[in-house]
Amino acid sequence: MIFVKRNNRLLFLFAICLCLNTATIAQNLVSKNAKVRFFSSTPIEDIKAVSEKGVVVIIPKTGEIAFQVAIATFDFDKGLMEEHFNENYMESPKFPFARFNGKISPFPDLTKDGEYTVTATGNLLIHGVLKQRTIPGKITVSNGKAKLISAFDVACAEHSIKIPKLVFTKVAEVIKVNIETTLIP
């Protein structure tokens, strides 16, 4: 398990370095303040949280994308929810980041204004569990700026996120995730 975690960190760092080192080939797109929201809805309680500290790097020449958000950066309406999220569910000291590394296709021509429907296929790492995913998204280009929006679901069981029976009716088994950011060269 430690080898897998270390290997995933090295892979992510390699992807970031690759993105940063290819600046001479093509100008990369970067965001250091991607907004990541998630929402859990049950008949008893809705839970929502937001982080504005996601990091995204896209290499336009290859369509590669790397994304990371620190789990502990999510803010909740209630402090107790935030504490339970970090300590009991996501175990953020043990699994501090959620990551995605993949490739966007079809990759749009970012020199032309427009709204482009895309998908990113790659590996999503949450709670120490790596899953291959295809995630839908939209890239909107306007006046030379690119905005990325994505919405997808994450099943807690697929990432070994255990929901105690005591609160099973308060936490949804499938969490809705939204990502939104403006990318700059």
Image (cartoon, rainbow, N blue to C red):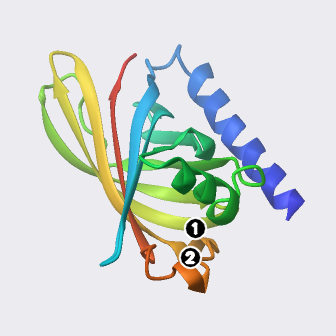
Mark 2 neighbour density, 10 Å: few (under 14) some (14–19) many (20 or more): some
SS assignment at label 2: helix
Residue 64 can be seen, yes or no: yes
Taking 136 as reference, is 80 left or right?
Answer: right
Taking 55 as reference, is 45 left or right?
Answer: left
- Image coords of residue 140 (percent x, y): 19, 34
Mark found first going from the N terminus, 1 or 2? 1
Q: Using the image as rendered, state which of residue 109 and residue 75 is in the foreground.
A: 75
Amino acid bearing label 2: Glu
Tell me what residue is drawn at x 64 percent, y 47 percent. 97
Q: Using the image as rendered, state which of residue 5 and residue 163 is in the foreground.
A: 163
Q: Which residue is mark 2?
A: 158
Vertical side of 176 occupied by 17: above or below: above
Q: Using the image as rendered, state which of residue 143 and residue 87 is in the foreground.
A: 87
Separation of residues labelled 1 and 2 (CA atoms): 8 Å
Check if mark 1's residue and mark 2's residue have beta carbons within 8 Å: yes
- Image coords of residue 120 (percent x, y): 39, 53
Taking 74 as reference, is 89 left or right?
Answer: right
Residue 106 can be seen, yes or no: no
Which label belongs to residue 131? Answer: 1
**Quick one: quadrant of the N terminus?**
bottom right
Taking 92 as reference, is 80 left or right?
Answer: left
- Image coords of residue 3 (percent x, y): 88, 58
